[in-house]
Image (spheres, grey):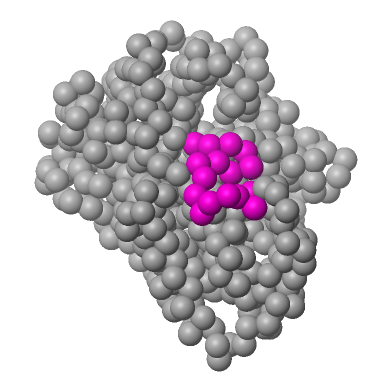
Amino acid sequence: MKKAKEYKTEYGTISLPMSLINRIKENIRGTGISSVSGYVSFILRQILSSPKSDELFDKKTEEEVKERLKSLGYI
Amino acid sequence: MTKKVFVFGIDGAPPELIFNEWLEDLPNIKKLVQNGTYSKLNSTIPPVSAVAWTSIYTGKYPKDHGLFDYTYRKNNSYSDIHVISANNVKEKSVWEILSENNKKTIACLTPLTWPIKPFDGTMVTGFLTPGIEKEYTSPSELKQEIETLFGGPFIIDIADHRSLSKEDLLKKIYEMTEMHFMLMDHLIKNKEWDLFFGVIMGSDRMNHNFWKYFDKEHRRYEYDPKFEKSLKEYYMFLDKRLGELIELLDEDTTIIILSDHGIKRMDTRVNLSDWLVKEGYMVLKEPIKEKCKFDMDFVDWNKTKVFARGAWDGQVFINLKGREQNGIVSKEDYNELIEEVAEKLKKIPGDDGKILNTKIFKKSDYSGKYDNISPDMIVYFDDLHYGCNTSLIGNDTLWSPATVMGSDEVTHSQKGIFITNNSKKGNLGEIEIIDIAPTILNELGITIPKDMEGEIIN
């Protein structure tokens, strides 16, 4: 198998007020995120990459997936 | 050394071939089988990929995760049908549970993981991802990383396989699978993980498209030397690539190889909508003059007692008062109607007059939190050797191989495969699909949640 190249992600540092960090820690307790950095990164990515519509799975996208499922014979 | 678990899914891999006929030609799988524990894996009712993979990664049956098909009826509407996504999965995945316990996961190409829910680790979403223009990776910068790795667009799934020639389809499946293995190799080497959960879907695409060149007992068997060995050769290629991934693992890594269901030939289909009309259970506003695409708008709901959906298993619904928008069947009459319809369905013969081994599952077989949306009956005509056609109506006979989208040569079978190196017990016979999640958690020293009913296999 062809070997893939190594790819390292670079990180920077941002500052957040401790009160906000503590609120985030409360919010992520019992969820699938174990670090404040992970949570903040996830939320910011969602905001930066969100389509204009609030609905991630909009009607057009759903229709495309439906057509694919039909072509597979699954529906 | 920190314990790791490597889970590798081969969608649709059938035990009859993997454990028997082909085992000698799959040296890496054979080594695991001979030195470990293996069994058939009892899939979900029904055995469809999105439903089954959800059960695998949540440790819950459909009765507890609420998915019974690729689509669902919004608010129990007759015709407002929607496609499922990860938003419909309300139960926690193993990787979410691991995140709560400071363990990281690489989830690579797992079906029904888009859109991505927060967890600690790396994800590339799989089957049912709308397209690579969507956020299909976590972290999102992985998307750019993947494009750099491959120098171009990444193929999550083959979008247009019915329009391709068999030659082109075969090439495309291999191209896609090579990309998937390269991606898995890259992630295993470069990302932190305690659990790796990867799935190959190319096997299911091969099963559906090349079975008729391999299975001489198939009604539509076609001899073509170009494709006669394609199916087996693909699995041999999978085995080779799997071996290369296994070489990357620490020696004490627990390995789990599995499939979500198996595969079997499909002879033809029962025209279920036509049957319901003929038996008087479904009444149409106007008689059908010629074969056409069925629409729920054809139905006179004030006179209809039973309706159905499905292209593989038949999903039968009673037009129940209080649940359906125009329900006419009372709760008091429900059980009697179910029994009556079930008995009649079992008596539908094959197109050659033979008695079919039709299996009926009633709500009591999968009763749980989602009784208000689950089908009232799930039907496996001739144990799924006969599919179901509910999308074409006005057919000349009770049977036809095609739905409105065309025909298919195979259907999913109830049993998949399970192999692990975590013990050396040989052939266990059969395990349940919900045993996988607790087994993974146990291997990583995580307490099994109380609502996981499956057993730990070790």
Q: Left of B402 or right of it: where is B253?
A: left
Identify the image quadrant of residue B274. bottom right
Residue at 70% in and 77% down? B303
For the N terminus of chain B, the image quarter is top left
* Residue B256 in picture, x, y percent from top left: 30, 39
* Image vertical order of residue B451 relative to residue B16, above or below: below
Q: Nearer the viewer, residue A50 or B181?
A: B181
Farthest bottom residue in view: B332
Residue at 80% in and 46% down? A59
* Residue B373 in picture, x, y percent from top left: 60, 69
Q: Left of B18 or right of it: where is B308?
A: right
Report the span colored magenta: B392-408
Q: Is residue A22 visible?
A: no
Is residue B391 part of the magenta span, yes or no? Answer: no
Q: Nearer the viewer, residue B335 or B286?
A: B286
* Residue B228 in picture, x, y percent from top left: 34, 17
* Residue B47 in picture, x, y percent from top left: 43, 51
Identify the image quadrant of residue B145. top right
Total marks in image: 0
* Image vertical order of residue B391 relative to residue A48, above or below: below
